[in-house]
Amino acid sequence: MQKTGFTPYSHQGDSSFWRTGVADIALGQELFSHLHQTNLDTKGPRISSIGSCFAQHVGKWLNAEGYSFNQSKLETTQVSSFAFGNLYTPKSLLQWLDISDQEKTLKSAIHCEDNRYFDLLRPSFQPAGFKSQAELVAARLLAVDEMVCTITETDILIFTLGLTETWRDKDGIYYPSCPGVISGKFEDSTYEFHNLSYEELSTDLKEIATKLKSINPAIQIILTVSPVPLTATMTDKHVMVANQHSKSLLRTVAGSLSDNHPEFSYFPSYELITVTNSGDFRFESNLRSVTPQAVNYVMQHFRSVIDKESHQQPVTETIAEPIEVQTPEIPHELICEDELLEAVKRLPRHQNRQKKLELTLVGDSHMGKLSKALNGMQVQHCGGMVMNGSAFSQNKLSLCETEYFVPLESPDTRRLWSAVYDNLALHEQDGTHNNSVVITNIGMQTHQNIAKFISWVNQIYPQGILEITTKDYLDYFNEKLTEQLSVIYKLHSNGHKVIVISDPPFSKFFDDSKDISKYIYDYYKAMSYVWSQFGICFYNAAAQFDKEVDNPEHYTSKITFTDGTSDWIHGNKNYYNWLAAKLMTLID
């Protein structure tokens, strides 16, 4: 009779059991042991990264840690090794590897509007468009040439798989995003939805490996799966079910290839982010965006892949502890979306040369509400809301020499900005800059920027920090808000009188947000200092409101969301009427 207590599991190590391998690990403070079997021979490897948005996190971390990361010289607005932007499926990468051999693909996926040509294979690249189709095609060929050169200089290629859902046209050309979302125009007769199967994913990845090896036989491919959930689904499933289907397929394909094909390895960034944990630090409040702490935690594990010396480090290495501040949930984006839709509806169908107006508003939903207050005062102006505050905070804009910047949030936001820019251009063409006043809250967006700032502080000071100083805010502005603030500076440099205004003061009046109120007010003080150095007016509406208003409850938003949280970001109609009256005294 066999001895009791013995099973095939008896000789397995701690990492084979959930309790000792996962549950007993202090997530975020302790590294997992025996997490992967990736074993590379190269010391000090040259690394390239491609794939979904999570691939940019990989590149940023590698740069920050001093590793040899191949950065595209053609695409500098993103941390990317190739001038393609985000590629969420193997099909998209395979298409670029084949494009120079397929004349049809090379000259397809091009949208023409207002005599400008937009590359739908790279919807975020050159957002202002190209002068001609020939110029666009030539730019694609430059991207291909750079791709080949980069591959020859790559020891490790990290490919982060993001989606199975994709869009293609009737000619079988696949798009990195649905046409019309970032660039182009959607037409049912041209585009169709397609959900890639296991067989398609596996076949495409094998073909990609073959083509990469033909360029660089020594290249090693590490597959990862993005932990970022789907934004939306085109299937008939709930987005949670569709997301699980998509990620499961990608994970299964990546696992099968790494187990059975030596050219592939798998690194479990997906598991490190999605394994269950109480009091989770790995996702932002929208439960979709991955926090800097989470990226750092993943890449601490990845260090052992590329740095042989890291094997000597203890697995109990402490990871950055977040400051003990709870950043509130932000379900108010629906309010902003409604404001954006209203702004778009107010646009004329045909934008002819407009009457030149002296006052221009540029910003998010606060500017949209301010516009309504000015209309009530019969103050002529143009503009208002251009993008959602989250879009400004997430740098969904591209600097442009001719138009200051190009919004990348949606075609609608580009239409909104175009109408605003036309008014500014009239002043610049006529030499009437001195009569042009621009009111903006670009760079504020404290409902998102404060959470991002706190995460940034945690990353900069992994050992902890006793007090956050003005210099910390200034360093954050310099590192994270350069593009946003340069738009304001350029408006000032071109002769427009610019007034930057703070967000409302209501964070301290709500339980949902009072814990971050001090950071918001310190943010305003730091921003005031920045603009004073450039001779630009900063109006601290929050501080002024506190000085003179004795009954703030009459100015707060009364909106309560379905989850019980309050709209502490916006004020009500009374607040924006108060703000409009105050700003008029500055203009007059």
Image (cartoon, grey):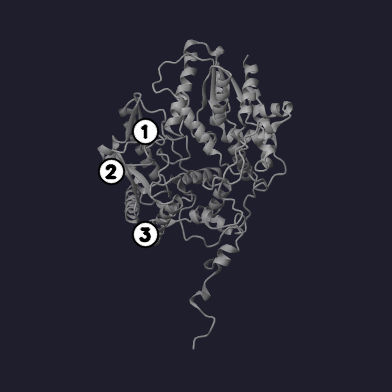
| Residue labelled with disc 2 | 172
| Badge 3 element | loop
Sequence order check, earlier mark of 3 and 2: 2
Disc 1 to disc 2, C-alpha distance: 17 Å
Of 137 and 177, the residue lying toward us: 177
Residue 100 falls left or right of residue 434: left
Residue 66 falls left or right of residue 250: right
Q: Position of residue 297 (x, y in %)?
A: 56, 52
| Badge 2 element | loop
**Residue count near mark 1 (Cα–Cα under 10 Å), binned few <14, some 14–19, many ≥20:** many
Q: Position of residue 64 (x, y in %)?
A: 55, 43
Sequence order check, earlier mark of 1 and 2: 2
**Which mark's residue is nearer the viewer, 3 or 2?**
2
Q: Residue 184 carries which label?
A: 1
**Which mark's residue is nearer the viewer, 1 or 2?**
1
Amino acid carrying mark 1 in the image: Gly
| Residue labelled with disc 3 | 261
Question: Which residue lies at the image location 39% right of the left edge and 35% below the top edge?
Answer: 123
